[in-house]
Image: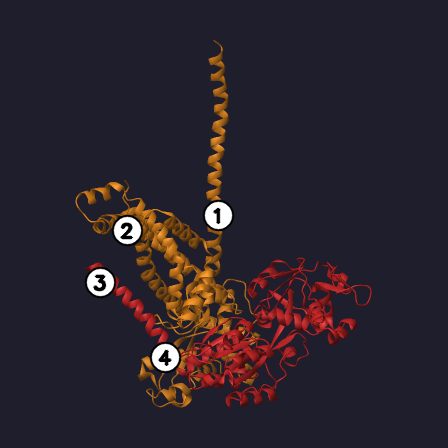
Amino acid sequence: MSKPVNNLEKIRKSLNRRNRAEKRFRWYGLVAVLIGLAAVAVLFTDIISKGHGAFRITYMQLEVNYDQDLIGINNLTDPEQLMLGDWQAIPKVALRNQFPEVSGRKDKRNLYKLVSNGAGFDLKDRLLANPLLLGTSETIWVLTDDDIDTYYKSWLDGEPYAARLSDKQVTWIHELHDEGKIRLQFNSNLFTRGDSREPEQAGIRGAVMGSLLTLILTLLLSFPIGVSAAIYLEEFAPKNGWTDFIEVNINNLAAVPSIIFGLLGLAIFINFFHIPRSVPIVGGLVLTLMTLPTIIITSRAAIKSVPPSIREAALGMGASKYQMVLHHVLPLALPGMLTGAIIGMAQALGESAPLLMIGMVAFIVDIPGGFSDPATVLPVQIFLWADSPERAFIEKTSAAIMVLLSFLIIMNTSAVWLRKRLERRW
Amino acid sequence: MTQRTIITAILFTVASITATSSAMARDSIEVVGSSTVYPFSTVVAERYGRASGKPTPKIESTGSGGGMKLFCSGVGTNYPDITNSSRRMKASEYKLCQSNGVKEIIEVQIGYDGIVIANSIKVAPMKLTRKDIFLALAAQVPGEKEGELVDNPYSTWKQVNASLPNTAIEVLGPPPTSGTRDAFAELAMEGGCKKIAWIAALKKKDKSAYKAICHTVREDGRYIEAGENDNLIVQKLEANPAALGVFGFSFLDQNADKVQGSQIESVEPTFESIADKSYPVSRPLFFYVKKAHVGVVPGIQGFLNEFASEKAWGEEGYLAEKGMIPLPDAERKVMAANTRNLVPMTGKEALK
């Protein structure tokens, strides 16, 4: 009769041990989550601390004179004159007036380097927008060179970096600062311009447009094809060796490294169909190949989760199989399919490897306006900037990463939101 | 009904996009090639685009070898118009071009680029010779007897040359796919390699064995391939003052507060020393143009004129500001005239 007491004793002893094991197990899980969060936090702080500077840029105040003789034009509608006009002369003269004591060839050259070498073209654009300015003067904020920008920002932060500047240039900047003629402004160029080799003139508009065009095409192609394939495989295809074979292959494709889709795209679309390199059409087609497996797999899962009773009820009411799928299964499975599509699109947005092969890793200044204009995409822009020697591109790179991350966050959040909102549990 | 309309619409758009694009002629210049020339080529392209108001040339960085392959594939708007190269076209590439119908090629040398071996400014600059570089980095070095090769035994700089500091050999540099690596092997390593008499003598007897000795970099972890990203090498040097890094002069120029160039044969890498060729590790930069495309693809002549102008590649031009070392005055004048007049290669050049 002593046996049950012993058992109880055993259980009591083991209970402590099991409770401890459970506690440990929960701790492991928590630590794993914390490690993940810490990695994200480090990534974000690093990127934001490096990139926040790029959203502001240094401008200096100059009194510019749109002198016809200086620029060498008398008619703003003559394209020949506009092309040959010496636009950079406007800021050069303005700088000489600002610092009249500067003489000598070398000093003047250093002086001219204070403003961005695109400043003349900016003034040209302004003049074309307001033709009445020709022949008049105005006081205006002009973009500075990237070296000046880097110095001014680092000086404001207390760690001046002047290796690329001469002592005179530094004195001039401080003179301007004391007179309140140099300041940081919101960097609108970053969002309105295409790529440039001059960091102060570079923007991500071209890359964002390229990403948008490529993704539109990817969505237009991959969603209908992916959904049709999923419907056929789930609802119509007989279950036999062939469909198993197809399923294995689709799963395989989802795991193929993306560069291989790039090689495939190069061989088929460019070398065989002679679609030009570097255009969103090729990019969209290649990314379609890449996202199709993801969309097919998630769509099939969504269709599978629709309970058979719905199908049976529809068929029992006399609906044809086509009606059953289109009127009942598809609407119920759509939220899951959309979530899959958004996740696939987010994947495609962050992809750069397959685009390397089809020439979308390129220096493209003009902002693409259509599917057949040369274009690049956001991740590629980040790669190109990270590889540039100019110091000021480091913060630009981080800024572009921030923009890409915010797009990804928006897309992924909307996927979660859609699922929460529309999903029906059975 | 609505579904059918949507599907038809989608199919129609896709079909029409594909159809129009493949039949379309190109109105912008296509440039491919070297990642070393890329920073210079892009600046010219951008200036040309902004000044002329015409489409800006599109520039891909494919590496010198990859660019030549694309360039020499054929004539027509499906193939690039210009390729950049950080070395001269090889005889084999010229042949490939000829056999694919790319008959008339204009060769333009634009200037020089220096390759620097740099370390962090936190420590003293290194004073190296090319022979030191070869002995420290080659996979196999001469042993005691003449004609004998042993696996590289050196682990510190002091072992290589008693006047160097007693720090471990650790060099970060580009991978074999890079033009910078080719040039580094040819100019720095081979330059030191041929200082050893019996290896120099081998060059005439067995060229491939000579090349294998001089160009093969050790793979025991002392030379670390740091990828094509030179900014990354600069960051790593800053974190590790004992290491040296190999990259192009323009990166040294931009990061003078973090890294310093080592003296080679007691010449410091500066703008002036590379221009007057006293700094030994420098290489010429080129681009090649298809004459058949001039006049077919609009803007090529304009782009060439921009490139060959004094304000671009001159002593004080904007390319010099970006870190390119200009050609000497006389050579530059001849080159500019050749470029403007579209003088093609004769096929009699001494190509390797």
Q: Callout 3: helix, strand or loop? A: helix
Q: Provide the chain ID for the residue under circle 4.
A: A
Which residue lies under the disc numbered 1?
Answer: A38
Q: How many marks?
A: 4
Q: Callout 2: helix, strand or loop? A: helix
Q: Provide the chain ID for the residue under circle 3.
A: B
In this picture, is B161 found above or below B335? above
Q: Quadrant of residue B122?
A: bottom right
Which circle's residue, 1 or 2, is located before the other in the chain?
Answer: 1
Looking at the picture, do discs 1 and 2 lie on one chain?
yes
How would you rate the neighbour count of disc 2 (Cα within 10 Å): few for under 14, some for 14-19, many for 20 or more? Answer: some
Per the model, the C-alpha gap separating discs 1 and 4 is 47 Å
Percent coordinates x, y for residue B73 in the rendering = 49, 76
Residue placed most toward the observer, B45 or B16: B16
Which circle's residue, 4 or 2, is located before the other in the chain?
Answer: 4
Q: Three-letter amino acid code at disc 3? A: Thr
Which residue lies under the disc numbered 4?
Answer: A125
* Residue lying farthest to the left in this orientation: A317
Q: Provide the chain ID for the residue under circle 1.
A: A
- For chain A, give the colour: orange
Which residue lies under the disc numbered 3?
Answer: B5
Which residue lies under the disc numbered 2?
Answer: A334
Per the model, the C-alpha gap separating discs 1 and 2 is 35 Å
Q: Callout 1: helix, strand or loop? A: helix
Looking at the picture, do discs 4 and 2 lie on one chain?
yes
Per the model, the C-alpha gap separating discs 4 and 2 is 48 Å
A74 relative to B129 in the view: left or right: left
